[in-house]
Image (spheres, grey):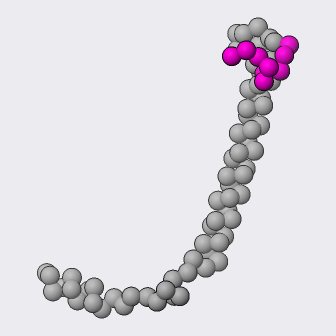
């Protein structure tokens, strides 16, 4: 059993430093992830604006306020 492991490790050549690259596939995946994060953040911001607007209308059983949310006492 130990001989098989030693032979497997010895027969697997170590790649050179220049042979290991992400390539265009890695770049495409990275760009796709960045685009996905931007879209999710835009959607999240839109939903937060909807929540603020609903809160201003008094949807959450609070009385509507005339001041913007940033000026309210917390």
Query: Could you say which quadrant of the image residue 69 lies in?
Result: top right
Residue 66 placed where, x, y %?
A: 86, 13
Residue 56 placed where, x, y %?
A: 80, 18
Q: Nearer the viewer, residue 21 or 51?
A: 21
Above or below, comparing residue 13 to residue 57 in the picture: below
Is residue 59 visible in the rendered structure shown here?
no
Please report the bounds of the magenta region as a residue range. 66-74
Quadrant holding the N terminus: bottom left
Above or below, comparing residue 34 to residue 6 in the picture: above
Is residue 46 visible in the rendered structure shown here?
yes
Residue in the image at 64% along x and 59% along y: 33
Q: Is residue 71 magenta?
A: yes
Residue 48 placed where, x, y %?
A: 73, 32
Query: Could you say which quadrant of the image residue 9 lies in?
Result: bottom left
Above or below, comparing residue 38 to residue 7 in the picture: above
Residue in the image at 77% along x and 13% along y: 58
Q: Is residue 69 magenta?
A: yes
Q: Nearer the viewer, residue 61 or 13?
A: 13
Q: Is residue 60 left or right of residue 70?
A: left
Residue in the image at 73% along x and 34% along y: 47
Q: Is residue 3 left or right of residue 29?
A: left
Residue 13 placed where, x, y %?
A: 36, 90
Assign the magenta stretch its main secondary structure: loop
């Amino acid at each position: 059993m130990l001989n098989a492991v030693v032979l497997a490790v010895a027969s697997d050549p170590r790649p050179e430093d220049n042979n290991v690259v992400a390539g265009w596939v890695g770049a495409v995946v990275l760009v796709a992830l960045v685009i996905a994060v931007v879209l999710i953040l835009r959607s999240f911001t839109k939903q937060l604006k909807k929540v603020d607007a609903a809160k201003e209308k008094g949807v959450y059983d609070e009385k509507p306020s005339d001041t913007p949310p940033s000026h309210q006492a917390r």
